[in-house]
Image: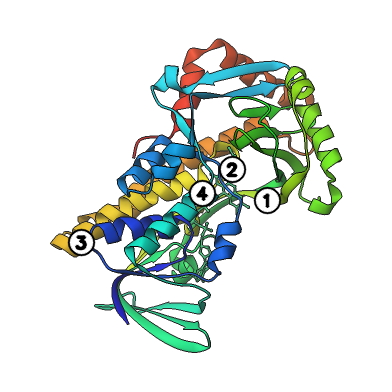
Amino acid sequence: MDTQVAIIGGGPSGLLLSQLLNRAGIDTVMLERATRSHVLSRIRAGILEWGTVELLRQTGVDARMEAEGFPHDGCYMTDEDLMVHIDFKALTGKQVMVYGQTEVTADLYAAQDAMGTTIIHEVEDVQILDLDQAKAAVEYTVKGERRRLTCAYVAGCDGFHGVSRKTIPAEKRREFERVYPFGWLGILSETPPCNDELIYCNSPRGFALASMRNAHLSRYYLQVPLTDKVEDWSDEAFWSELKRRLPSATAAAMETGPSIEKSIAPLRSFVSEPLRWGRLFLVGDAAHIVPPTGAKGLNLAASDVHYLHEALVAALKSGDESGIDGYSEKALARIWKAMRFSWSMTTMMHRFDGEDAFAEAMRRATLEHLAASETARRELAENYIGLPY
Ligand code: FAS
Ligand code: PHB
C-alpha cells in the first residue's frame, strides 16, 4: 500500500492531523494500536485553548463543541480561603473552552469516517523504515498478516509510549525530564460542579483541582503520593480530603456523589529534541509531556499539528520544503514556553516532600502577589489561554 502521509497513532494528534491533511486533498493512512472503543474510553484533558478551538473550527469539526462546550472567562487560584480570580477575558480578551478530550476525539473519528479516510485499528509491531530514502516505509502486523506501507512522510502521533520517538537513534536525541514525586488522583462524578469556573487549590495538605465537563458532570483531582493506589481511596475519603483543600465556603456548599471514574496519573515534564528525523516528524505526546496543572497537554498537540499540517501541505502541494525544514525549531519554541508555564504552575501549587515553612510562605506570597497585581494576573492569563501559534 502507498500513501502520502502515514500517521502512527489515532489519538487527538493523529486524528486532527489526518482531518486537516485530508481536507487539503492529501492522502493519509492512520495506524492505531488500540481498538476504537478503547481510545474513546480514555478520560483525559478538559480545557481547550482558544487556538485549539479555532483549529477545530478550521477542520469543520466544531458543531458539537459549539453546542455543548462551555466558554469560560476565567478561573480561580486559592490558598485556603484566599481566592484570586484570574479574569482571562478582561486581561487578554480571550476565553478557554470546557469540552473534554474524549468528546474531541469522538467528534474527530466521526468526521474521519464521514470523509472515508483509512484508519487501521489493532495494529501490532509497527516499524518505521527508510526515513533517509526517496520514500519512507512503515511495516506493521494486523490480524496476523505482516504489511508494508510506503509514503512520502511519517507523522509520529503515537504518544509517550509509542515507537516513533524511539525510531530516532538515541545518540541523536536530546531528552529533558523532570519526574514529580506525586500523582493526580482524578474522579468523575455525576454531580453539579462546585463552582462556575475552575478552582486550582493550594493548601497545606496538597494541591486540588475542581473542574467539570458540563452542568451535571464534575471532574476533581487531588495531589497524592506516588505510592497511593486507586483502591486506597473510597469515594468518602476522596470527598472528605477534597473538602479540606477547597476554600471552606466552597466545600460547605458542594454536592458530592458516587464516582463513575477514578484513576491516578503520574506527573512529568518531558521534551525530546529534535522533532524531525528524515521523513519522520514527532507530534504531541510522542515528543513532549507536561504536568496537567497548566492544561497544556492536548493544546500543545494541537499547535504541533497546526505547524506540521501547514508544512506538509506546502511540501506535497508546491514542493516548498521550508516548512518541514523549520518544523522542529518552530514547534519547539512554543513547546518550551508551555513547558515552563506547566512547570511553574506545578511547583507553585503542589507540596513537595521535605518542604520547610519558607517554601510554604513563598507559595502564599505568590498568591498574595497575584491578588494584588493585575500584571501578575495578566502574565498567568496569557499563558493559560494559550500563547499565539
Ligand atoms: P495520545 O497518547 O493521546 O495518543 C497516542 C495514540 O497512539 C494512542 O491512541 C495509542 O494507542 C497509539 N499508539 C501508541 N503506540 C502505538 C504504536 N506503536 N502503533 C500505533 N499506535 C500507537 N492533558 C491536558 O491538557 N489536561 C489533562 O487533564 C490531561 N490529563 C491526562 C491524563 C492522563 C492519564 C494522560 C495519559 C494524559 C493526560 N493529558 C492531559 C495529556 C493528554 O491529553 C495528551 O496531551 C493528549 O492525549 C496528547 O494526544 P496525542 O499526542 O494524540 O497522544
Ligand atoms: C480537567 O478538567 O480534566 C482538567 C482541567 C484543567 C487542568 C487539568 C485537567 O489543568
Q: Nearer the viewer, residue 121 or 330?
A: 121
**Residue 103 circle label:** 4
Q: Quadrant of residue 312?
A: bottom left
Q: Amino acid at mark 4?
A: Glu
Tell me the CA gap for discs 4 and 3: 32 Å
Helix, strand or loop status at disc 3: helix
Foreground mark, 1 or 4, reads 4
Q: Amino acid at mark 2?
A: Pro
The residues bearing labels 1 and 4 have C-alpha atoms spaced at a distance of: 20 Å
Res. 367 image quadrant: top right
Give whichever of discs 1 and 4 has the lower sequence position.
Answer: 4
Picture quarter with the N terminus: bottom left
Above or below residue 117? Residue 384 is: above
Q: Residue at x 81, y 50 (%)?
A: 228
Identify residue for label 3.
315
Residue 316 lies left or right of residue 36; in this view the side is: left
- Residue linked to disc 1: 265
Q: Residues within 10 Å of mark 4 (few under 14, many from 20)?
A: some
Q: CA distance from mark 3 to mark 1?
A: 38 Å
Q: Position of residue 221 (x, y in %)?
A: 70, 39
Residue 207 left/right relative to 315: right
The reply to whether the residue tagged 1 has its Cβ within 8 angstroms of ligand 1 is yes
Q: Quadrant of ligand 1?
A: bottom right
CA distance separating discs 2 and 1: 9 Å
Residue 283 makes an appearance in the image: no
Residue pointed to by mark 2: 292
| Mark 2 Cβ inside 8 Å of ligand 1 | yes
Q: Position of residue 222 (x, y in %)?
A: 73, 39
Q: Amino acid at mark 3?
A: Ala
Camera-nearest label, 4 or 3: 4
